[in-house]
Amino acid sequence: MVFLRPTYLIDGDITDIELNRLKQDGIRGIILDLDSTLIAPRSGRLTDEAAAWLTSARADFKLAVVSNNTKEEYLRKTAALLAIPVFGNAAKPSRRVLLKVLDSLALKPEESVLVGDRPLTDIWGGKRAGMKTVLVYPLKTMNEPGWIKFFRKLERAFIKV
């Protein structure tokens, strides 16, 4: 399942990504998944830790959010909260919206990374768009049901093969 194997596998959440490493590797843009990766689903709130990481990332990278979420009001409020472009209804692993975002940021796929918590949507979508990818766990502050944790472990088992 090479198409699901991320460029960077993080044993933590988004706040554990080493921004200096990405910069050294020639990354100029970070495209972020929204729910579970950057904020808790449907919360519309950014944790202090995620906010600090986002502030650090803003200093050296072009940023955008690409989400499969289709709720326009939620996406609009989230864009205002984050103060970065948010693109919804992405239908990842489709690459259509990802390529549109890269074009709007004047970034090439090879100098960009897609950060997400799901191999079957985020990682596969980023790879299909020619981007590097980062797989993270959901935010540490989230408390997910046991069945979701089980499926996340199962997905990760397939990418480590």
Image (cartoon, helix red, strand yellow):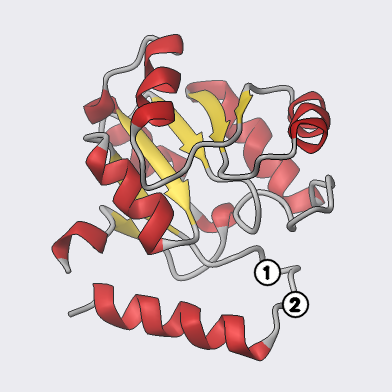
The number of numbered discs placed on residues in the rendered structure image is 2
Q: Residue at x 42, y 51 (%)?
A: 122
Left or right: residue 31 compared with residue 41: left
Q: Is residue 100 above or below residue 2?
A: above
Q: Is residue 57 above or below residue 59?
A: below
Q: Residue drawn at (45%, 47%), measured in percent from left and top? A: 115
* Camera-nearest residue between 123 and 73: 73
- Which amino acid type is shown beneath numbered disc 1? Lys
Q: Which secondary structure lies at badge 1?
A: loop
Instruction: Say which of 93 and 26 sits in front.
Output: 93
Q: CA distance from mark 2 to mark 1?
A: 8 Å
Q: The disc labelled 2 sits on which kind of residue?
A: Asn
Dividing the picture into quarters, in which one does residue 22 lie?
A: top left
Q: Secondary structure at mark 2?
A: loop
The label shown at residue 143 is 2
Say which of marks 2 and 1 sits in front.
2
Label 2 Cα neighbours within 10 Å, binned few <14 / some 14-19 / many ≥20: few
- Viewer-side residue, 93 vs 61: 93
Residue 88, position as x, y percentages in the image: 60, 33
Q: Which residue is mark 1?
A: 140
Counting from the top left corner in percent of width and height, residue 6 is at: 28, 57
Quadrant position of the C terminus in the picture: bottom left
Q: Position of residue 53 (x, y in %)?
A: 64, 43
